[in-house]
Image (tube, rainbow, N blue to C red):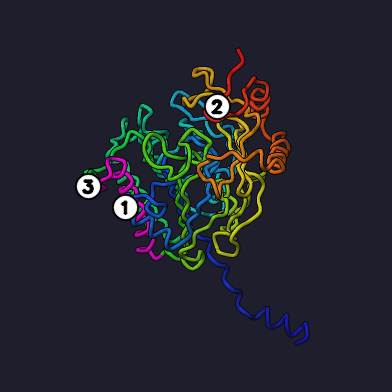
Amino acid sequence: MQRRQFLAVTASAPLAAAPAPPNVVLIYCDDLGYGDLGCYGSAIPTPNLDRLAAEGVRFTHFYSANPVCSPSRAALLTGRYPTRVGVSRVFFPADKVGLARDEQTLADLLKARGYATMCVGKWHLGHLPEYLPTSRGFDEYFGIPYSNDMNPRLMLKGTEAVEQQAVLETITPRYTEQAVGFIERNKAKPFFLYMPHTYPHIPLAASERFRGKSKQGLYGDVLQELDWSVGEVLAALKKNGLDKNTLVMFSSDNGPWFQGSPGKLRGRKGQTYEGGVRVPFLARWPGKIPAGRVLDAIGSTMDLLPTIAGLSGAKLPAKPLDGVDIWPLLSGQKKDHTREALLYFDNWDLQCARLGPWKLHVGRYNSFIYGPAPSTGRVNLRLRPPELYHLVTDPDESFDVAAKFPDIVRDLESRIAKALPGFPAEVQKAWRDTDGRDTAPSEPGRLPRIKG
């Protein structure tokens, strides 16, 4: 066929319709442990979440960017380390700050792409109007602006309080009702539903329907109600014919606090041991994500923004991202990928770095008392020598092998040294302060000491 004939044929042929961008449902629990779901080994029945795993992919090495609430949420919604976006610690009702106003959220990107957007649940990135979801890319908001142990426990619709003290037993059912209603209202156009649940953060409560149901105490009852909520959202997608064009994801902001299970991992919320930062992650998209897969590749909540932006055709933020597009992993194109070392921060303090199977601990707090210095006397101290763990053979970080693998230690230390100058001044100062404190060598059963 000559060029003129080809152009005539292609000009007269109908254009193929571009595939519709997927709907996105992101369900995010508060203080849910790595070992809390049936598909991760829990004795608590979670049939809907187990079905989500069976119909999609389950990660075994997926990470929150921080072991506490506000920073982990900031990283999830921006694709950047929380220390880059001004959220180094948990926000309280007395705070007048929030996620930096010059940061773009995932909701901002998707709204610009034509998505309907809603946040249902716990926000915890600033409670003043300019920091609430309706100022950060969400068309609608319904939920509690911070943790349920903070007062007043406002229930907001948009920026208006509809309850001055939200009734704990009704929280999960009301969130679910709002989520299902949003799906039904927006079934004819692409939508982003961000559903950060209040539970299982304490104080715990379950509706009458679920109290005593799990036979595993109140914590188990709360998890079963959360599992029911996931089932209701999945049912709403199916009822409205949206299953095959909806990416559903489920995860947690950090490890378990006083109750719950980190599985066989060491540590809990507020610690950069694996139990504080490794979280469940499930993803399902029928026909796009192969069913029944279990992945050992490293993933991070920071990866969700670039991944979803790529799938939706949304324009990425101008600021550099720390997350990477993990669609090749989700879709089954790859089983693993190459990425730079993943850094573990708590407050402004760098404590660990992860690369492949290796994790290097370079700093640790002198106390596990929760809260920032100086009120608690809690400070970060250098580990000299650092501790190295192989997380595939030693997932509970029990056997320090730094002396056996000095080349790995040097490589990770050099990566840290290269990365730190790119972080804000507060991070670099915190590292200098950590480096300057007098510490004892790392020995089993011995905590470093503070000079003076």
Q: Which residue is mark 3?
A: 209
Quarter of the image holding residue 203?
top left
Residue 119 appearing in the image: no
In the rendered image, residue 270, in percent from the top left (x then y), is placed at 48, 33
Q: Residue at x 70, y 40 (%)?
A: 406
Q: Residue at x 53, y 40 (%)?
A: 397
Mark with earlier residue (1, 3)? 1
Q: Which residue is mark 2?
A: 365
Q: Is residue 217 magenta?
A: yes
**Residue type pointed to by label 1:** Pro
Residue 337 appearing in the image: yes
Answer whether labels 2 and 1 touch (C-beta < 8 Å). no
**Residue type pointed to by label 3:** Arg
Disc 3 is placed on an element classified as: loop
Q: Which residues are magenta?
A: 213-241
In the rendered image, residue 119, in percent from the top left (x then y), is placed at 44, 45
